[in-house]
Image (cartoon, rainbow, N blue to C red):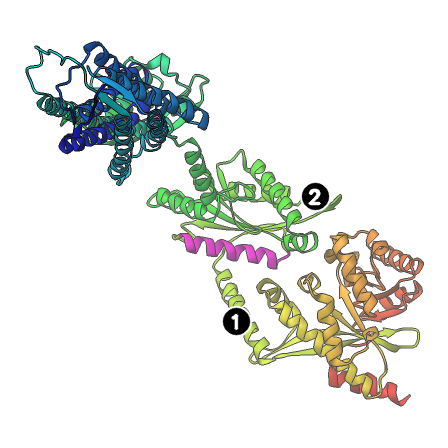
Amino acid sequence: MEHLHGTYNMLLVLISYIIALAACYSALDLAGRINKAKGLARRLWLVYGAASMGLGIWSMHFIGMLAITLPMEIGYHVDLVVLSVFLAIIASYIALFFVGRNELGVKQLLIGGITMASGISGMHYVGMAAMMVNTSYKPMLVILSIAVATATSIAALWLLFRFRNDESRYAVLYKLGSGMLMGAAITGMHYIGMTAAQFHSVEQSMNLPDMEIKQGILAYIIAGGTIVALSITLFGITMNKRLTQKDSAIVENERWYRSLYENNSMAIVSVDINGTIISINPAVTQITGLQEADFINKHVSTIGLLVSEELRDQTKATYYKSFEEKPQYYETTYINSEGTHIELSFINVPVEIEGKLVGNHIIAKDITEDKRSKEIIQNLAYHDELTGLPNRRMFNQLLTQTIAATAGTPLRFAMMVLDIDRFKLINDSLGHTYGDMFLKEMSERIVESIAPYRVTLARLGGDEFTLICDNCYGEDEVMEIAEQVVKVIQLPYQLKEHDFYVTASIGIAIYPDHGEEPVQLLKNADTAMYEVKKKGKNGFGLFSRHLDEELLQKVEMEINLRKAIEHNEFVLYYQPQIRPIDSRMIGMEALVRWKHPTKGMLPPGMFISIAEETGMIYELGTWVLREACRQMREWHDAGGPLIPVSVNLSSQQFHQTNLVAYIRKILDETGLDPQYLELEITEGMMMDASVSTVILNELTALGIRISLDDFGKGYSSLSYLKLFPIHKLKIDRSFISDITNNDSDKAIVATIIAMAKHLNLEVIAEGIETKDQLDILMANECKEIQGFYYSRPLSAADVEAAFFVPMRLV
C-alpha cells in the first residue's frame, strides 16, 4: 500500500490556531458567568458554554485536518464527524463543570484534566477516523499527543479556575494571554496527532457526488462560520456581562439602602401616596413596640391613633404638610401598649420618582432620655442641687415677677433674708458632708413650717436663704411667719450622735417701702439681718432707714481693716494673769487692738467679727501669734520672768490644714520655747472629735499648752475633758459678773473648780473686778485670776514697767 505525503495550507493552520484562541478566551469568560449563576441559569450557561467551547475546539481540529492537502480527494463519514463533535462538547462540559465549583483541589484538577483530555483525544482520533482514507499511526507520537492533551487539559482547567472571576483592569490581558497559551497547547496536541498519522492510497478513489465544494473552500466556510459563532458567543457574553454589572450595581445599591434602612437606629415607616404603610424597619419595633405584621398594608392613621390625644391633631396636620414636597420636622408623644409615654422627634421626608411624589418616609428618633436630661439640666439651672429649693437665678426671676405683679397696686409684699448664726461652726468642725446634711434637714423644716402660707423659700448659697411672701399678707402676718421659721431652726440637730444647736437671723424688707428694685430690696433685707446678728442673733427684724448708716459704717470699717493689715496699724496689749495667794504674775494674755488713724484705739469687739466674715482673720491671727511670741522671747532675754503668753485661736485658724507646721515655724522664727506658749480654744472648735484630737495631740507633743476658753458658756460636753489633752479651764466672765448675788452662778463656778481639781486640770477665772468676787473664788481654791481687779490690758511698755521690772528686782 502506497504511503501518501501531504502538504499543509499555512493559512488554514493559522486560522485553526485563531479559532482555538477564540474558543479558549470565550471559555475563560464563560467560566466566570457559570460560577456566578445559580439554579436554572447556571445549568443553561453550562450547556451553552460547553456547546460553544466544544464547537470551537472541534472546528479547530476539523480545519486542522482540512489544512492538509493529500494527492487525492478525501471524503468523511458523517456519523463519526457528529460523534467527534459530541465528544468535544462533552470534554468542554467537564471542564466548565469543574471550574464552576467553589473549590478546585489537586485531586479534582487531575480527575477533571484526565477526563477532559480523554474527550479531546477521543474527539481528535474519532475525527481522523471519519476520513475516508486508510490511516496508520506512529504509537510514540500518539502517546505524546495524548500526554500533551492531558497536560493541556490540566493547565486549561487551572487557568479557567484562576481567572474566572477576575474583573480587574488587567483582566482582559490576563485572559487573552491565557487563551493564547491554551490555544497553542491545544493546536500543538492536534498537529502532533496529525504527524502521528500515516495516510495510504487505496485502489479505487472515492466517488463523492455530494461534495460539490472543494475541500479547501469547505475549510474556509467552516472556519468563517465558527469564528462568527464564537464572535456571537463573545458578544453575548460581553452584553450579558454589562447587564450583569448593571444588575449587580442595582442589587448592590439596593443592599446598601436595605442595610441603612434595616440597621438604622432611627425608626422608619415608609408610606405610599395613599397613606398605606408599605414598609417598617426593625427600629420601629425596638422603639415603639409596634410589630410590622400588625400595621403593614394598613393606613398610617392606625399609628396616628397611638399619639398622645392632646397632640394628635397637630401631629396629623404636620404629617400632611410633608406631601407639599418639603421635609417636616416636629415632635410628639407616643403611648405604647404598656401605657408608657415615649417622646419622639419626627422628620417626614417626601419620596419622588421621575418627578412625581409617590409617598414619604416617616423617620422617628426616641428623644425621651434627651428630654429628660434637658429637664434635669433645666431643673439644676433653677434649683439648688443640695436642697432642691429654687436657687439664686430662680429667686431673682421670682422677685422680679412679684414686683411686676405688685407694682401700680396698693398691695405690698415682704422679702426675707435668712442666715444661720452657727453654721460655720458645724461646717468647720464636722466637715462639709455633715454641713450638707444639716442644711438639708434645716431646709426641710423651714418648708414644712411655711407650708400653710403662700411663701417661696430659696437658697442663695451656703447658709443664706431667702423667703418671698405673697402680697396677701400684712406686716403682722409676715412677723408671725418669721417667728415660726426661727423657732423650728433652733430645735436640736443630731449629727455624729450629738445634738447640735443653731440659731437663725432674719432680716425683712417690705416692697415698696424699703425699695422698689430687686437689688435694693435684697440689700435692705441683708442690712436688717446683720442688725439682728449684731443685737445677739436668733431673731428677726424689719429694715429701718437708720440701718443704712450702720451698714455704710461697716463697709467703711471693712475697707479700713484691709488697709490696717497692710499698714501694720495693730498693736498687742497684755493682761496679766495673777496667782492671788501671793499676787505674783504667772502668765499673761495677748489681746489685739487697732490703732485707727482717726478713731483712735479700737477694741477687738469692733473688728474681729468683720475679720472673720471677710477671711482676714488668717492674716490678723498670724500677726498676733508671731508678735506675742516675739515679745515674750524679748522679755525672757531681758531677764524674765519666764512665764507663758496666752493667745486666742479663731475657729478658722484652728481648722487650717497646716496649723501645727505653721505654729512651729513661728516658734522657730521668734525663738520662743514651746512651753511658754498657751493657745486658747473654744468648745465649738472640738465638735469633730476625730479631727480635733489629732490637732491637739500634735500641738501638745510640740510642748504647747492648751487652754479651754469660755468654759461652760457654749453647748458643753464633759467628754471633751476626757478625750482631749486640755491643760487649763478658763471660767467665762458671764459666771463671774453676778457671782456675789447669784447662788446659781456661785454653785456653777464652785463645781467647775472642783471638777478641774479632780481631773488634775488648772483653772483660771477671768473678769474679776471686785474684792468680793476674788474672795469667793479664793474660798473655792481658784488659784489663778485675770481681770480688772489686778490690771486692765496694758501695752508692752506699761506691762514691763508695772510688773516685769519690779519682779526682776526682787
Please give the name of the residue rendered at 45% of the width and 22% of the height, measured from the top-left corner. Answer: 340
Image x and y of residue 223, in percent? 14, 25
Q: What span is colored magenta in the figure?
A: 518-536
Judge whether residue 346 can be spotted in this image.
no
Label 1 environment density (alpha carbons within 10 Å; few <14, some 14–19, many ≥20): few
**Is residue 785 depicted above or below 218 in this figure?**
below
Which disc number belongs to residue 559? 1
**Is residue 474 depicted above or below 162 in this figure?**
below
Image x and y of residue 437, in percent? 64, 44
Please give the name of the residue rendered at 10% of the width and 12% of the height, measured from the top-left corner. Answer: 208
Amino acid on which disc 2 is placed: Pro
Report the label total: 2
Q: Is residue 626 left or right of residue 3?
A: right
Which disc number belongs to residue 692? none
- Which quarter of the rendered picture does the C terminus lie within? bottom right
Which disc number belongs to residue 492? 2
Judge whether residue 397 can be spotted in this image.
yes
Image x and y of residue 707, in percent? 81, 65
**Is residue 390 depicted above or below 303 in this figure?**
below
Q: Please say whether residue 561 is one of the residues in the magenta stretch.
A: no
Mark 2 touching mark 1, by CB under 8 A? no
SS type, badge 2: loop
Amino acid on which disc 1 is placed: Ile
Q: Is residue 514 left or right of residue 798?
A: left
**Is residue 668 depicted above or below 386 in this figure?**
below
Q: Please say whether residue 534 is one of the residues in the magenta stretch.
A: yes
- Which quarter of the rendered picture does the N terminus lie within? top left
Front-most of 167 and 448? Answer: 167
